[in-house]
Image (tube, rainbow, N blue to C red):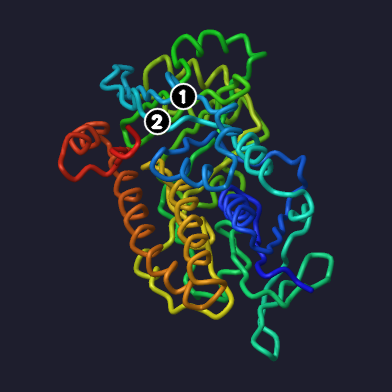
Amino acid sequence: MAPDIAIVGGGPCGLALAAMFEQQGIDYVVYERSAQDTPPRGGCLDIHRSSGQIVLKEGGCFEEFKKYARGGYATVHSLFDHKGNKVVTFGEGRDSPEIDRTQLRQVMLSSIPKENVRWSTPVKSSFRNENGDVVLEFEDGTTASGFKLVVGADGMRSKIRHLVTEAEPKYCGILFLTLFIRPSNPYHLTLEQRAGQGPMIFCGRGKKIWIQRQGDGHYRMDFGWKGPADFPSEGELDLADEDSVKNFLLREEYFGGFTEVVHEIIRNSTGPFRTWPLYYFPVEHLNWQTSPGVTLVGDAGHVTTPFVGDGVNCGMRNALVLAHKIQDLGITQEAVIAYEQEMFPYAQDVITRSVASGELFLAWDSPKGLLENMTSPNRLIRDEGDY
């Protein structure tokens, strides 16, 4: 007999939901496409006191989280203009510690029985059978059905979303190119002295650079600008050629007009170089009619850009709402309707603010507009609940 709930996707939102279901005694299974020993991609995450930390407490793994969480200086952001002048620091005293994605996965798995997560089980497609039940088809050709509820937690390229809405995420026009400075790099000590533990941010000339120390000491550096989602086009740049990538970034129209410190960082960086085009879910489509036996959490339902630092926390918070509605109303259509009606406005707000914040970060005269907004009554980056 099938478990009552199938969670498709074992990222932060899927595992958070599973941890809460475990505490509630709900019968569930998680299907995750990657192998358990495959590290999740992406930089570290800040888990907010007002949202993500509440989820970890209800999932029974908050004490485990505290073993890995990096607070203190790791939460302090330093913002520079393109000439290298420090214009502001923010985040001091904020309860939003950083944690690497692999560590966060381990934290949540500490509350979930091993047999409840099916690793290396990618869902190829989903459909409804003649009875209207949701059927999951896996890459190996097998299928699974009979669930009372299927939760799509499988990210921006969700295989479940089409059962709920025809709307798709939209490219925001901004992409990042990711570079690295690892502890074995001779330049690492210099960068550590300059950047410290918290994020180091450069803005100006329509560009943004985000430099952040990860849990093992290496620095992940995201260089962002406005351009096509399919960058690089054929023949434009070979991302496997380190010298070509560095020379490209040092062009005047990219980061050549930045401070010499940025030039040093680029020259000393290493790959693998990866592109990261940014997408968001159009807020006008966050209003679908609830579909029987299926719903979405996290990026599957409301992917956002990263410019207000609330993407994973928004997803975990909404997973919490779903868990509460199921606890109160059972695994019912009524519970899913109540969840989605609460999820829609919250996600709409986060997405709207993040897209607008991205425009401020990548304005030609940035960080001017960003600084003005940070002191206005209508701040886009909100963290009041984390102090």
Q: Position of residue 384 (x, y in %)?
A: 28, 38
Q: Which of 254 and 54 is in front in this view?
A: 54
- Mark 1, Cα crowd under 10 Å, few <14 / some 14-19 / many 20+, is many
Label 2 or label 1, whichever comes before in sequence order: 1
Residue 238, picture quadrant:
top right
Question: Spatial distance from mark 2 to mark 1, Cα to Cα?
Answer: 7 Å
Q: Do the residues labelled 2 and 1 touch (CB within 8 Å)?
A: yes
Residue 262: give x, y in percent of width and height.
44, 20
Circle 2: element type: loop
| Depth check, front residue: 326 or 160 | 326
For disc 2, the marked residue is: 95
Say which residue appears at 77% left-offset and 56% top-offset.
118
Q: Which residue is drawn at 65% across and 61% down?
A: 8
Query: In screen coordinates, is 266 left or right of 287?
Result: right
Tag 1's secondary structure? loop
The relative height of residue 228 versus residue 295 in the rendered view (above or below) is: above
x, y percentage for residue 138? 77, 67
